[in-house]
Image: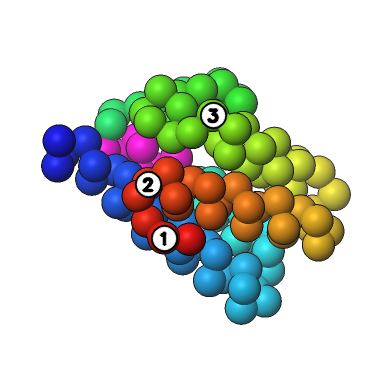
Amino acid sequence: LAAARQPMTEIAAIVRSSLKEIASGENSTDAIIRCYEQMSYAVDEKRGLRRDFTMTASEFAQRLERAGLPHEPVQRLTRLFESVRYGAGKTAPRDVDEAVFCLNAILKYCGEKA
């Protein structure tokens, strides 16, 4: 059981770090992208769920969910990631609010206080 919680503990630490970046006024686009990539890396390292080179972010989100992360926040954060990563590049205030909401939901799911 402790081994199963380890990825969630690491993901919670990544989420907290990303929330601090966003709150400090750092580039929110970069923070959103880094958070998604770091969560993906943590799941890859701890659960061996590798993202295939040809796999889309949405396809990989399904793997994140199978690793134990909650469906709705993962899907919403994935859509936001795709928007800022492949879109115009600038985030709107509502995008930041959405990222914070999703990150807090993931943090709560990991057993951490938001």
Q: Earlier in the sequence, mark 2 or mark 3?
A: 3
| Residue 59 spot, x, y in % from top left | 56, 21
Give the distance between the C-alpha atoms of the residues marked 1 and 3, in whole angstroms: 19 Å
Q: Quadrant of residue 63?
A: top left
Q: Which residue in the protein does label 2 denote? A: 110
Mark 1 residue crowding within 10 angstroms, few (<14) / some (14–19) / many (20+): few
- Helix, strand or loop at mark 3: helix
Q: Do the numbered discs 2 and 3 sit on residues whose CB atoms are within 8 Å? A: no
Identify the residue at image location x=30%, y=51%: 9
- Helix, strand or loop at mark 2: loop
As drawn, 23 above or below 36: below
Q: Which residue in the protein does label 1 denote? A: 113
| Amino acid bearing label 1 | Lys
As drawn, 32 above or below 48: below
Q: Nearer the viewer, mark 1 or mark 2?
A: 1
Magenta segment range?
38-46
Q: State which quarter of the image contains the N terminus.
A: top left
Task: Please tell me the numbered disc located at residue 71.
Answer: 3
Is residue 34 toward the left or the right of residue 14 in the image? right
